[in-house]
Image (cartoon, helix red, strand yellow):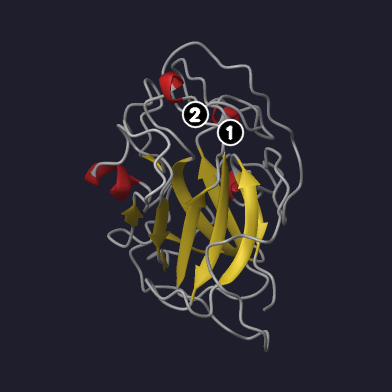
Amino acid sequence: MKKYLAFLSISAMMLTSACSATVGEDGDATTEDGTGGGGDATTGGDSTTGGDAGTTDAGGTSTAFKAVIIYDKYTEPDCKATTSPGPDIDMVAVWRGDKLIGVGKPGSCNYNAGTNVACPDNKHADADDVAAACGPFGDLDFKDISTGYLGLGGGSLELEIGACTTETTDIEKCDGKGDAVAIEAGDEIDVYEVDKWYTGENADKKKYITGACKCIAETYEVWLRTAKGVDAGSLEVGQKTGTGTLKVPAK
């Protein structure tokens, strides 16, 4: 995303097969450079509508949303190829124009394993992994991919966005510990899913993961809620495969 890549000191800052973030030989999935929202580090995946995880109210365009919920939409898991089945969520950031308004607020991340668990042996869904999906970029263990992200494993992740306590355009420095931020139409939601974007297939060809990783992109769906746990009035943002940017539509 152009805004994250400001952290890399550039001028501007998210495909399906198997499961990602498994330590081992690189997988054969490839990523596609694209442009999603204002980002230049998206890795393919069309935004679509028609999800089954909420309802969209008809009406005006001024509704502000207080929670983000991400659903696992990966439909062909290879349970033997991964310790983290389903999309592997590292972090979420929200931008309004060129301003980073916040990242996942620490302590706000909640994981629901769901009832349709395709791969029951998910080793990346404990309390530490859930907590790691909130807060800034950089808590991932880049050497062996053993900590720092949540494997959705057929479930969902819900979180609030917390403001940066110090204004910054660097997602490593935005702590998300400020007040919860309302998300509006036109905002960009950046979802970092552990895929080949992390191994040098970002716009700068910057390699973050230094260990071996299959890092295969997986599909997820993003919705917004008026408050955590409240499904009525939800707004579908779209689907993405791997690390990418989605723009919040008007209701």
Asked if residue 171 shows in the view, the reply is no
Residue 13: horizontal and vertical position, in percent? Answer: 65, 47
Residue pointed to by mark 2 = 20
Q: Amino acid at mark 2?
A: Ser
Q: Residue at position x 52%, y 40% from top?
A: 193
101 or 26, nearer to the observer: 26
Q: Identify the element where label 1 is drawn.
A: loop
Secondary structure of the residue carrying tag 2 is loop
Residue drawn at the location 41% of the way across and 43% of the way down: 152
- The C terminus appears in which quarter of the rendering? bottom right
Residue type at numbered disc 1: Ala
Mark 1 touches mark 2? (CB < 8 Å): yes
- The x and y percentages for residue 127 are 23, 46
Rendered view: 16 above or below 236: above
Left or right: 38 as drawn, with respect to 84? right
Q: What residue is shown with label 1?
A: 217
Percent position (x, y) of residue 227? 41, 77
Image-based side of 133 in relation to 241, left or right: left
